[in-house]
Image: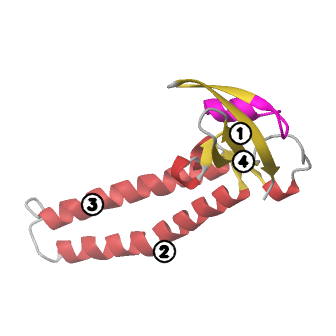
Amino acid sequence: MTKSPITKTGAERLREQLHELKTVERPRITAAIAEARAHGDLSENAEYHAAREQQSFTEGRINKIESTLAEVQIIDVKEINEKDKVVFGATVKILNLETDKEVTYQIVGELEADIKAGLISIASPIARSLIGKKKGDIVDVNAPSGLIEYEIINIEYV
């Protein structure tokens, strides 16, 4: 089984979220269930059912994060020795040759991709087009809106 790559930063975020769920959310939900039980008849107690549903969701999320962390390959981007080529973890500044608009993306694992934060999945069309390329290269990206040409302006591993 191939492990999915994730950056060290992405893994730390998952661990923080797991810690929050276990130390804050889980005890809060347990207290809410205990309080709802104190109200008596559980069959028609909406607070109890809502708290149990929330508990189920939280436990599912905890299990998902734990299994995800067990199945990933954590990569420290700062230790990558590729300085002139785009590989996983690279932060790439590219110029759209049609619009002259510059954008910067970091190529990350699928689990941590967030386009609004400038984090694109290694499986995305743009990342697949950039992998293996060097500064100054022109890349063609098959986007849903059609073919887009980008020039690689800068590559960093931060």
Question: Is residue 80 in view?
Answer: yes
- Residue 128 vs 32, above or below: the answer is above
Label 3 sits on residue: 52
Which residue is at 49% across, 70% downward?
Answer: 20
Q: How far apart are marks 1 and 2 (CA)?
A: 28 Å
What stretch of residues is rendered in magenta? 124-138
Q: Quadrant of residue 9?
A: bottom right
> In this view of the protein, which residue sits in the foreground, 38 or 140?
140
Q: Distance between the residues labelled 3 and 4?
A: 47 Å
Q: Residue 23 carries which label?
A: 2
Q: In which quarter of the image is residue 47?
A: bottom left
Q: Earlier in the sequence, mark 2 or mark 3?
A: 2
Question: Is residue 76 in view?
Answer: no
Quadrant containing the N terminus is top right
Label 1 sits on residue: 3
| Labels 2, 4: front one | 4
Residue 143: horizontal and vertical position, in percent?
A: 56, 27
| Labels 1, 4: front one | 4
- Residue 132 vs 105, above or below: the answer is above
